[in-house]
Image (tube, grey):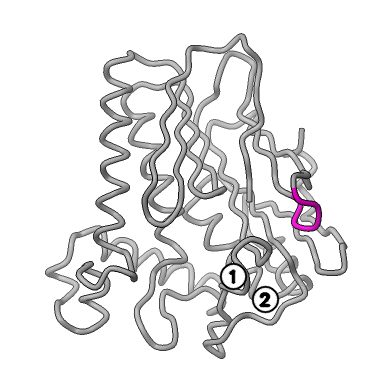
Amino acid sequence: MADPVAGSAQTPAAVRRVEETMGTVFSFDVRGGEPAAVRAALEEAAAELRRVDEVFSTYREDSEVSRLARGETTLARCAPEVAEVLELGAQAERASGGWFSTSFRGRLDPTGIVKGWAVERAARHIAAAGASGVSVNGGGDVQMLGAPGAGRPWRVGVSDPLRPGGLAAVVSAAGTDELAVATSGSTERGAHIVDPRTGRSAVTDLLSVTVVAPRLTWADCWATAAFAMGAREGLRWLESLDGVEALLVTAGDEVRWTGGLAARLG
């Protein structure tokens, strides 16, 4: 899980909000922009997260995704976002060699991509309203755009899976206008990541995989896929992805990282 790290007090006034939906907590930290426009966009983004839950939740029997999985409706009759997310999921499956999937035990389940996609979408909606800095944290996965202040980058703390309350690293968005941090692991939610080859919980030597990339949609997918692969194959695959860095922590308390991660720490 990743947590925002406090920045300097010399920053534009912050507009913050917390929204509980999709079985988790979303926190917004928005800087700059015309206050009324920013607040309106923030309200719209929060409302859209609630709508995403209504459409995509696999726990709601009446959601469009649940009905689609049961064959009670067609993709053409669903909200256009359903086709968009499933296409993104198919791209992630191809890029990961099948280690990422939008199905669970033969049933449609895009859970692994929806949250990251929804957080990124919310952040971009608020930025488009004129905010100079946006950070949206969805259950520990963060999309950052712009900056919280002049010369002050967004920074995100990555939790240490072996030391509750401790940090394994601090990621900085210095030098870029968009950065995302996503973590997959078993420490807080147990064995919830599935090996698509077997349909069972992934048997892996990893406790967590944190991926740093421009877009949370992909960072979330890549963290999930790499966790299922295990430390050796996961690190090798992550190293092959353009613009992607990662930190992996094994059950044996070994920390591994991609070659360019050091440039993103601070």
251 relative to 165, above or below: below
Residue named by callout 2: 229
Q: Residues within 10 Å of mark 2 (few under 14, many from 20)?
A: many
Give the tally of numbered discs.
2
Residue at disc 1, secondary structure: helix
Q: CA distance from mark 1 to mark 2?
A: 6 Å
In the image, what residue occupies the spot 33% across and 35% down? Answer: 125
Quadrant that contains the C terminus: top right
Residue type at mark 1 is: Ala
What label sits on residue 87 in the rendered view?
A: none
Q: Residues in magenta?
A: 160-164
In the image, what residue occupies the spot 39% across and 63% down? Answer: 88
What label sits on residue 225 in the rendered view?
A: 1
- Residue 233: say if magenta: no
Residue type at mark 2 is: Met
Which of these two is toward me, 4 or 96?
Answer: 4
- Percent coordinates x, y for residue 208 in the rendering: 70, 62
- Percent coordinates x, y for residue 265 in the rendering: 76, 38
Residue at disc 2, secondary structure: helix
248 relative to 243, above or below: below
